[in-house]
């Protein structure tokens, strides 16, 4: 288990933790939440041994292997798949030792190292690495490209895959979804649900936290508080406590009035029953949980447009793309005032391309795009953060677009985005990604747009700012077209979805759960046929068929060895569990003098049960693979 005892942690002059206490048991999946700068990443560094406690104690089992998602990439020449395989250092060491032994023709060492390679699942390592990459959105061609060929966001995906590749008892993930689209997030959720070790996860995606974690640790006022359940359970518990305070109650009533008005407006125009119920439930849950965020530093809204056009935008027979490459074709889209649309679709299908065309950053290859006379677009995309003037302050940025406005009015407006006091006058140069995103949203909100085009607006935003943005979008009377991997934002602010896939844009009649199922079907249809599957043409080349059978027989051997090894290990774990249960049945063990022994036995029991479940699942998967390969072999012969 992990134990923090009366822990004090300081970075420079800032004290992050003071007298903090926390106990986490093996196998728990824990979300770590708190305001930006509160010390979440520093706590991860402490657990990795990169920082020391200023007082108190941090206890992590000495034999635990710790995997974490690095923030830097230091080998740009490696192929992507090799870079991911480097995440398993023991495997790489065995492979290096084996190459040396083979060069020296040392038979005994070769035999021993092949046994170690089998024990480290080395024969399936390449396939496992490719499966991780595919889940995170890489195609077969990208897997063979150099790391240096990828953009920063895709390099972070490689770092995530490398962390998942590393065998570990403790996995530390700091904002793993920041550079992922919705497809990859859904895949990562399933992977983490099956992870057998202890998981600590920093994330600002409430739906992702709800899907993955079973406990939440809240870092607040230099203390750590453990809550049972996911993020929604944390919100409810905290809301119940804060709602007892009169100030919280009053603010809750104001927020509730806004949300009730939004729900009424939404219900009046909702036409698709399944989507309607999904959105209304999300809105009603927001209404109940408003008090949990009473101490949020954010309180803003998008200023209302003075004029409006109908339609705002009209695109007919649109063909969108880059040069000779057509991404979307035969596109017809009309945006009316009040439209609230979420764009869904696989990675690379053209969602961002569509938004760029509507925003005027990219011209359509063909078709007619007509803009309303009074159209005012508020366009948010990640590249706009880089377009901010590093030497200018938030106040100066706003003064440039509102030179005639009183300075105090601008300062008050920026305060709603938590730019207050001296922070208003500091240059953007040293701002974090979240602070830059908040400033970009503030500049949009000031300019009275009647159409918001938002491409991943929640990247880098913390939970409180995401909620504030959700509330502001609910109150916004103009049209919204949004691409986001934040399902909570999509469910709470849109009332229809468009599906972008296979070069087309069409209405999607369903909710996000339906989309997740659609995505599974879509991936299975896109997956290439297995290279091991025998050809079934009437005139089969017998030589090719024999080669395929031989390849299948060769594949069977490592899986058979793996299944036998897993069965042996499972039996050993079960024997150890039986021994512990015999000792736990001794009533003398529960005497006060033996409480430390009892605590250790219970911890060993929890760890072994988690290991048993993991081994059993891996053993069954190996058996299923063996059976499938055996069926293919029989069919080929």
Image: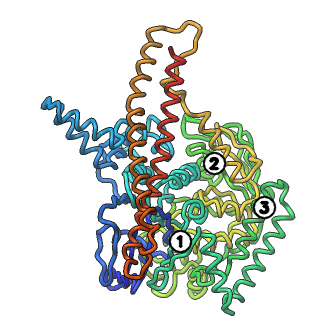
Placement of the N terminus among the 4 image quadrants: bottom left
> What residue sits right under mark 2 in the picture?
354
Taking the image as shown, residue 207 lies to the left or right of residue 55, namely right
- As rendered, which of 250 and 309 lies closer to the eye? 250
Using the rendered image of the protein, determine whether residue 534 is visible from the camera's viewpoint. Answer: yes
Taking the image as shown, residue 38 lies to the left or right of residue 105, namely right
Q: Quadrant of residue 601?
A: bottom left
Badge 1 marks a residue whose secondary structure is strand
Q: Position of residue 604 (x, y in %)?
A: 40, 64
Using the rendered image of the protein, determine whether residue 173 is visible from the camera's viewpoint. Answer: no
Q: Position of residue 448 (x, y in %)?
A: 68, 71
Q: CA distance from mark 3 to mark 1?
A: 40 Å
Q: Is residue 156 above or below residue 448?
A: above
Camera-side mark, 3 or 1: 1
Camera-side mark, 2 or 1: 1
> Most extreme residue toward the bottom, as rendered?
246
Name which of mark 3 and mark 2 comes first in the sequence. Answer: 3
> Most extreme residue toward the right, as rendered?
268
Q: Quadrant of residue 553?
A: top left
Numbered label attached to residue 115: none
Taking the image as shown, residue 631 lies to the left or right of residue 309, namely left
> What residue sits right under mark 3 in the picture?
337
Name which of mark 3 and mark 1 comes first in the sequence. Answer: 1
> What residue sits right under mark 1 in the picture?
216
Label 1 environment density (alpha carbons within 10 Å; few <14, some 14–19, many ≥20): many
Q: Position of residue 520 (x, y in %)?
A: 62, 42
- As rendered, which of 350 and 509 lies closer to the eye? 509
């Amino acid at each position: 288990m992990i134990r923090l005892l009366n822990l004090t942690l300081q970075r420079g002059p800032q004290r992050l933790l003071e007298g903090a206490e926390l106990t986490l048991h093996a196998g728990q999946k824990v979300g770590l939440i708190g305001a930006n700068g509160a010390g979440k990443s520093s706590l991860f560094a402490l657990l990795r041994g990169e920082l020391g406690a200023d007082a108190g104690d941090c206890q992590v089992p000495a034999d635990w292997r710790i995997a974490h998602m690095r923030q830097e990439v230091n080998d740009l020449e490696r192929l992507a798949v090799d870079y991911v395989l480097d995440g398993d250092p023991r495997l790489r060491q065995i492979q290096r030792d084996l190459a040396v032994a083979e060069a020296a023709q040392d038979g005994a060492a070769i035999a021993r190292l092949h046994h170690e390679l089998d024990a480290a699942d080395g024969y399936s390592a390449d396939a496992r690495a490719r499966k991780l990459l595919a889940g995170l959105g890489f195609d077969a061609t990208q897997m063979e490209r150099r790391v240096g060929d990828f953009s920063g966001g895709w390099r972070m995906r490689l770092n995530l895959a490398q962390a998942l590749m590393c065998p570990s008892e403790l996995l530390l993930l700091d904002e793993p979804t920041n550079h992922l689209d919705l497809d990859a997030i859904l895949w990562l959720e399933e992977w983490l649900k099956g992870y057998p070790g202890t998981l600590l996860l920093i994330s600002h995606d409430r739906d992702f936290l709800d899907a993955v974690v079973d406990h939440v640790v809240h870092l607040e006022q230099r203390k750590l508080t453990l809550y049972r359940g996911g993020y929604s359970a944390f919100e409810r518990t905290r809301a119940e406590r804060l709602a007892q305070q009169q100030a919280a109650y009053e603010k809750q009533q104001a927020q509730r009035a806004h949300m009730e008005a939004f729900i009424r407006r939404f219900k009046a125009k909702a036409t698709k029953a399944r989507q309607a119920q999904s959105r209304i439930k999300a809105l009603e849950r927001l209404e109940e949980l408003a008090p949990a965020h009473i101490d949020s530093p954010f309180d803003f809204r998008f200023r209302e447009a003075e004029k409006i056009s109908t339609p705002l935008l009209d695109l007919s027979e649109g063909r969108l793309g880059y040069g000779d490459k057509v991404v979307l074709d035969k596109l017809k889209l009309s945006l009316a005032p009040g439209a609230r649309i979420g764009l869904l679709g696989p990675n690379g299908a053209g969602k961002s391309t569509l938004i760029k065309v509507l925003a005027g950053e990219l011209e359509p290859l063909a078709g007619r795009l007509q803009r309303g006379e009074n159209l005012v677009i508020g366009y948010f995309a990640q590249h706009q953060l880089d377009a901010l003037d590093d030497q200018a302050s938030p106040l100066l940025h706003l003064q440039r677009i509102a030179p005639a406005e009183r300075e105090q009015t601008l300062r008050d407006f920026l305060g709603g985005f938590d730019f207050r006091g001296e922070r208003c006058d500091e240059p953007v140069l040293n701002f974090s990604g979240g602070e830059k995103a908040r400033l970009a949203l503030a500049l949009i909100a000031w300019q009275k747009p009647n159409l918001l085009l938002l491409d991943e607006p929640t990247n880098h935003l913390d939970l409180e700012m995401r909620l504030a943005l959700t509330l502001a979008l609910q109150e916004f009377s103009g049209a919204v077209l949004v691409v986001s991997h934040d399902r909570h934002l999509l469910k709470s602010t849109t009332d229809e979805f468009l599906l972008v896939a296979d070069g087309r844009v069409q209405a999607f009649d369903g909710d996000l759960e339906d989309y997740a199922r659609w995505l599974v079907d879509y991936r299975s249809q896109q997956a290439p046929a297995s290279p091991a599957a025998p050809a079934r043409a009437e005139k089969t080349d017998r030589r090719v068929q024999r080669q395929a059978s031989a390849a299948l027989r060769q594949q069977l051997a490592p899986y058979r060895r793996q299944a036998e090894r897993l069965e042996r290990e499972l039996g050993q774990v079960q024997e150890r569990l039986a021994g512990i249960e015999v000792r736990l049945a001794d009533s003398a063990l529960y005497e006060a003098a033996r409480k430390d022994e009892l605590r250790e036995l219970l911890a060993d029991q929890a760890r072994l049960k988690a290991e048993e479940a993991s081994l059993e699942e891996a053993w069954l998967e190996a058996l299923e693979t063996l059976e499938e390969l055996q069926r293919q072999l029989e069919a080929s012969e």
